[in-house]
Amino acid sequence: MRGFAAAAAGFLLAAASGSAFAAGDYGDGIPASASVSPLTFKGGVLVNAGGMTVYTFDKDMEAGGKPACNGGCSAKWPPAMAASSDKPQGQFTIVVRDDGGRQWAYKGMPVYTWSGDKQPGDKTGDNFGKLWHVVPQ
């Protein structure tokens, strides 16, 4: 019993000092050092960490959720790229692009920003060519 009490005391001391659990480790299987999606809803639409509106592309549906906007298309519609340390969580997933890069997706649809949007809150790409759409909340 003495061994159990010593182990419990050691555990409590480690927990109090912060060495037993990393901040942000909530038992969800994602290490505290890993990033999760920088995307969030603001003003009724999905935006990136800089507050810029993100969009889905209808042709990605035809490609089975694989990013169909590559090359010149991605110059105008930059993909919302995921870092190597980013981890999918909930409805935010990561898809692999043709060039091997990792791109954020929401509900299975890759997301992009639009070069025509100049400041946070702009939504000038919505319904562009009847193929690009904001992601509503």
Image: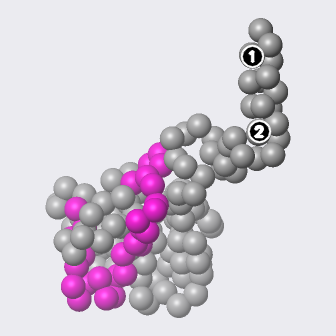
Closer to the camera in the image, 19 or 24: 19
> Percent from the top left, x then y, of residue 115?
42, 88
Residue plotted at (46% across, 61% down):
86
- The image quadrant that residue 110 belongs to is bottom left
The amino acid type found where label 1 is placed reads Gly
Question: Given the current orientation, which residue lies at the most extreme front position?
Answer: 2
**Does the segment drawn in magenta span residue 89?**
yes
Residue plotted at (82% across, 36% down):
13
Closer to the camera in the image, 121 or 90: 90
Residue plotted at (62% across, 65% down):
42
Can you say whether 118 is above or below 35 in the image?
A: below
Which residue in the protein does label 2 denote? 15
> Does the CB distance between marks 2 and 1 fall below 8 Å?
no
Query: Which sits earlier in the primary sequence, circle 2 or circle 1?
Result: 1
> Percent from the top left, x then y, of residue 45?
54, 65
The residue stretch that appears in magenta: 66-93
**Does the segment drawn in magenta span residue 62?**
no
Residue plotted at (54% across, 65% down):
38
The amino acid type found where label 2 is placed reads Ala
Disc 2 to disc 1, C-alpha distance: 18 Å
Can you say whether 74 is above or below 104 in the image?
A: below
> Percent from the top left, x then y, of residue 15?
77, 39
Which residue in the protein does label 1 denote? 3
Assign the N terminus to one quadrant of the image: top right
Q: Residues within 10 Å of mark 2 (few under 14, many from 20)?
A: few
Q: Nearer the viewer, mark 2 or mark 1?
A: 1
- The image quadrant that residue 78 belongs to is bottom left
Is residue 69 at all visible to an observer of this figure? yes
Residue 77 lies left or right of residue 72; in this view the side is right
> Percent from the top left, x then y, of residue 75?
31, 88
* Magenta stretch: helix, strand or loop mostly: loop
Is residue 45 at all visible to an observer of this figure? no
